[in-house]
Image (spheres, grey):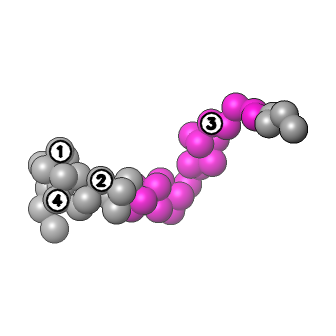
Amino acid sequence: MVLETTLWDPSEYLDSPKAIAAALDDIARAMGINELTGDTDTSI
């Protein structure tokens, strides 16, 4: 069985502020919120 893959560009789906906010939320959860806030000079 051969696995076929295709290119997928997530930026094609980030077409609204709500989608971008959701993506940033996912990144924050994956990185750990403290690391993200430190990189962006913000605090929560």
Q: Say which residue label 2 marks.
A: 31
Q: Residue at x 12, y 62 (%)?
A: 43
**Seen in the image, is 13 located left or right of residue 25?**
right
Whether residue 16 is situated above or below residue 12 in the rendered picture? below
Q: Amino acid at mark 2?
A: Met
Q: Nearer the viewer, residue 42 or 16?
A: 42
The extreme right residue here reads: 1
Does label 4 or label 1 sit earlier along the sequence? Answer: 4
Name the residue furthest bottom: 44
Q: What is the quadrant of the N terminus in the image? A: top right
Residue tagged 1: 39
Residue 38 visible within the image = yes
- What residue is pinned by disc 4? 34
Q: Amino acid at mark 3?
A: Asp
Q: Distance of mark 2 from mark 4, alpha carbons? A: 8 Å
Label 3 sits on residue: 9
Bounds of the magenta segment: 5-26
Cβ–Cβ under 8 Å for marks 2 and 4: no
Residue neighbourhood size for the residue with mark 1, other residues' Cα within 10 Å, grouped as few (<14), some (14–19), many (≥20): few
Q: CA distance from mark 1 to mark 3?
A: 24 Å
Secondary structure at numbered mark 2: helix
